[in-house]
Image: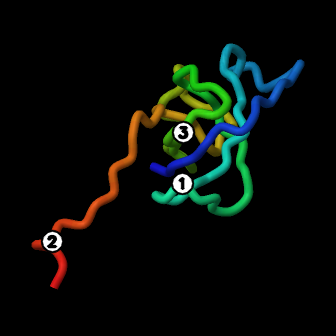
């Protein structure tokens, strides 16, 4: 899974029939520090996320798994909305 931020919504009057009912979102990949990581991608929204939200997504063949179809031309799917990110180093883990 990868971290990203929704920066826009893609509107299409026509799309592959199996994708009807799903929104396409423009997602900016992020690292754990919430810094931009590469170029934005288009991901299919399977959970109802919206612009400005931090999300996590899956890519490749796993992107079809959250859909209610067996096969669809999808490279990335949004599968969760992030509530918080906690990054810390345990003193016992540092030598």
Residue bearing the label numbered 3: 54
Residue bearing the label numbered 1: 34
**Looking at the image, which residue sits at the far bottom?**
95
Disc 2 residue crowd, few under 14, some 14–19, many 20+, Cα 10 Å: few
Which sits earlier in the primary sequence, circle 3 or circle 2?
3
Query: Measuring 70% from the left and 33% from the top, which residue is drawn there?
Result: 25
Q: Are marks 3 and 1 in contact (CB under 8 Å)?
A: yes
Disc 3 or disc 2, which is closer to the eye?
A: 2
Position of residue 12 relative to residue 32, above or below, is above
Question: Which quarter of the image is occupied by the C terminus?
Answer: bottom left
Task: Give how far across and how far down residue 54 sits, in percent.
Answer: 54, 39
- Its colouring scheme is rainbow
Query: Measuring 67% from the left and 49% from the top, which residue is drawn there?
Result: 28
Task: Give how far across and how far down residue 76 sits, in percent.
Answer: 61, 43
Residue bearing the label numbered 2: 91
Which sits earlier in the primary sequence, circle 3 or circle 1?
1
Q: Mark 3 to mark 1: distance in Å?
A: 9 Å
């Amino acid at each position: 899974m990868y971290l990203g931020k929704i920066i826009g919504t893609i509107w299409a009057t026509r799309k592959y029939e199996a994708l009807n009912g799903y929104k396409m979102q423009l997602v900016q990949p992020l690292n754990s520090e919430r810094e931009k990581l590469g170029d934005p991608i288009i991901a299919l929204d399977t959970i109802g996320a919206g612009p400005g939200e931090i999300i996590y997504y899956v890519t490749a063949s796993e992107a079809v798994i959250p859909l209610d179809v067996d096969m669809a031309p999808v490279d990335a799917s949004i599968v969760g909305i992030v509530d918080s990110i906690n990054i810390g180093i345990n003193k016992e883990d540092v030598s």
